[in-house]
Amino acid sequence: MLPTRVVVNGALGRVGQEVVRAVLADPVLRLVGAVEAVAPQPFFPAPGTPDLVPFSSNLGDLLEKVCPHVIVDFTRAQVSMDACRIALPMGISMVIGSTGFSEGNLTEISGLCDAHKATAIIAPNFSLAAVVLMHLAKIASKYFDNAEIIEMHHDKKLDAPSGTAMATAKLMAEARGSSFVYPPTEKEVLAGARGGEVSGIGIHSVRMPGIMACQEVIFGCQGQTLVLRHDSTSRESYMPGVLLAVKEATKRPGFVFGLDRLLGL
Ligand SMILES: NC(=O)c1ccc[n+]([C@@H]2O[C@H](COP(=O)([O-])OP(=O)(O)OC[C@H]3O[C@@H](n4cnc5c(N)ncnc54)[C@H](O)[C@@H]3O)[C@@H](O)[C@H]2O)c1
């Protein structure tokens, strides 16, 4: 079987560098190109491979040259949108980890897939553990009246709470069919001590160097608690999900949103 030809957009980014390593290490994938905002030399410094991998800041030109099957894109939403507008009409599949898409962006990508019988897989979270935790939290939500979420991330994270915490709370409330019970505090001694609150679920954000990404969901009812927790210790945690998406992208046309869909959850 011929290897799947992969281009990485944002190849020098924090996640992009992990994607490059993961693609190079996978026997059924071949890194055929790398794209960055600035590409100072014609070949990408790909670690541990004798292949010369074309490197460019112009995605369209590179695609014409290297004809990939799939582009993996961890850049930012507007850059990924431009990539979709170029690649999907060429029948090249997109696997996208960038976050921050609007509803309008997603509708446009879905339309491009339909119009060109192309594939786009977007996952706001490529961590298998995080996605499985969300699924388990949905199941548990039917059996408990109280729930709180503690999410912990590195100190460089821009937003709080995390998108995953907000999405988890939304899924939990939907699965339960109503808000959770949020016990009121008569006297809040320190403002913010109870964290934020969504659908009766308290949400607490910790920001600290030394942590990558962690989420804990605590459920409670009379005399018992259930704690679901995942820890991502490095950006490698996204790679099993990314590689799964790259391999699925060559098999199924259309628009897929969420790693849970690929996992059959
Ligand atoms: N889905 C997930 O599981 C997941 C996980 C982590 C991060 N993310 C998201 O992935 C994105 C990247 O995260 P990161 O931490 O790697 O950020 P980063 O800033 O380290 O990397 C982004 C890279 O994109 C490059 N870039 C910018 N404009 C470009 C352009 N026009 N063409 C090509 N490359 C361009 C930048 O130079 C940079 O190297 C963010 O949107 C982040 O929120 C998603």
Image: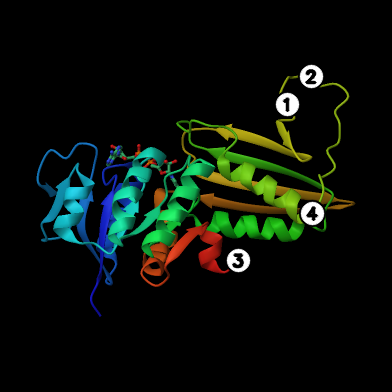
Q: Quadrant of ligand 1?
A: top left
Label 2, residues with CA under 10 Å away: few <14, some 14-19, many ≥20: few
- Residue 171: give x, y in percent of width and height: 68, 51
Label 1, residues with CA under 10 Å away: few <14, some 14-19, many ≥20: few
Q: In the displayed structure, would residue 94 be above or below residue 3? A: above
Measure how far apart labels 2 and 3 are at the Cα level.
42 Å
Indicate the amino acid at tag 2: Val
Q: Earlier in the sequence, mark 4 or mark 2?
A: 4
Kindly identify which residue carries mark 3.
265
Is 175 on the left or on the right of 263, as rendered?
right
Indicate the amino acid at tag 3: Leu
Q: Nearer the viewer, residue 233 or 1?
A: 1
Tell me the SS state at disc 4.
helix
Indicate the amino acid at tag 4: Arg
Indicate the amino acid at tag 1: Ala
Q: Which quarter of the rendering shows the C terminus?
A: bottom right
Kindly identify which residue carries mark 4.
176
Q: Earlier in the sequence, mark 1 or mark 4?
A: 4
Is 158 on the left or on the right of 170, as rendered?
left
Measure how far apart labels 1 and 3 are at the Cα level.
35 Å
Kindly indicate whether the residue at mark 2 contacts the one at mark 1 (C-beta within 8 angstroms): yes
Kindly identify which residue carries mark 1.
193
Q: In this orientation, does residue 45 appear?
A: no
Kindly identify which residue carries mark 2.
189
Q: Residue at x 32, y 51 (%)?
A: 18
